[in-house]
Image (cartoon, rainbow, N blue to C red):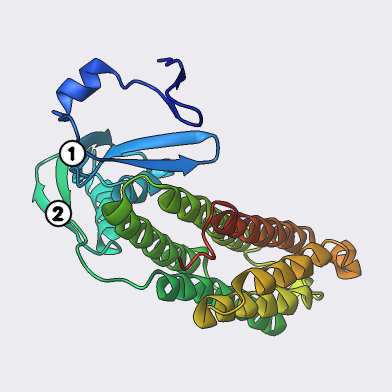
Amino acid sequence: MKRKIIKQGPSSFMITLPKDWIRQKEIMKGQELNVEIAGETVIISIEGGDTDKGILDLEFNELDLEQIHTLYSQGFSGVNIQFKSEKEFKKIKKIIDTLTGADILERGKNKVNILFYDLKINLEKNKLMVKILSLIKWQIQSLREELKENKLRSKEEIFEIYLEILSKISFLLRFIFYRKRISIDFINYKISSEHLKNIQKGILSFYEKSAGKSSKIKNYDILKSFENCLIKLIELFSKEKDFDKNLNNILIEIIGFKNFPELANLDKNLFALSDEIIIGLESFCLSLKNFSNTGKDSIFA
């Protein structure tokens, strides 16, 4: 749908809104609308409008269990999922148990109704981000210790931690959604959190590929550098001082990881993980800079 720009005055421009949308939303003359700028996108929403997106029907797909988290964070009221076996239902229930404000409302023979509650609570976003970063830091620290002892945890245990991180990220996004709808704040947090999820996916993939092979991995000192970098990111969100300056310093450090001579001597699986961590951390920091570039003083604005 295209609209022409209309010159209204010496320095004012305007566009018209679709008549059908105005009628459908019952927008009245003089009513205020929210206007958000997200890069090249302008988002227009109704002030104080209903953020509830309703309930979606899905079929169980083991390869896409994250979709439940996605619908949770995007503001849907709930989801109805068709499943074929008790095993599939248990996997669905495990996901729901990780989500704050999500409950199984009713279960049929092959269908489960899941309700997502409105999260009308007070939440300090930076503290939740600290928890997410701390979990990832702990994962890398634990991996380093396991490689030293030549004993890796099971991939099932790592998947449990992945679900915990995923639930915290989904909770953060849902909180922002209910207060600001699909705003630039929500979009920036969503982009940033995707990079953190990719790091944890890389950790999960490493455990899957390296099962029974830990004794072959002797060079893992680079993990300590990643751990120290995450500590600095945690401090960045904890102290909230000189955010942009400290973020730039951390970003320079991450870019320097690419030139580490240790990378050339890593086991192929640990090299793949290190590459995923470097890309994830760099992309995460670059996405944080969007908060400043869009007129905010920092991510805490």
Determine the residue positioned at 58% across, 53% down: 290
What residue occupies the far front of the structure in this picture?
10
Give coordinates of residue 54: x percent, y percent.
18, 38
> Marks 1 and 2: CB-CB under 8 Å?
no
Residue under label 2, please give it.
104
Depth check, front residue: 95 or 147: 95
**Quadrant location of the N terminus in the rendered image:** top left
The answer to whether residue 151 shows anywhere in this view is no
* Secondary structure type for disc 2: strand
Quick check: 143 above or below 287?
Answer: below
Give coordinates of residue 47: x percent, y percent.
23, 44
Determine the residue positioned at 22% across, 49% down: 86
Give coordinates of residue 268: x percent, y percent.
78, 58
Locate residue 261 relative to residue 251 in the image: left or right: right
Residue under label 1, please give it.
54
Locate residue 13 relative to residue 98 in the image: left or right: right
Depth check, front residue: 293 or 111: 293
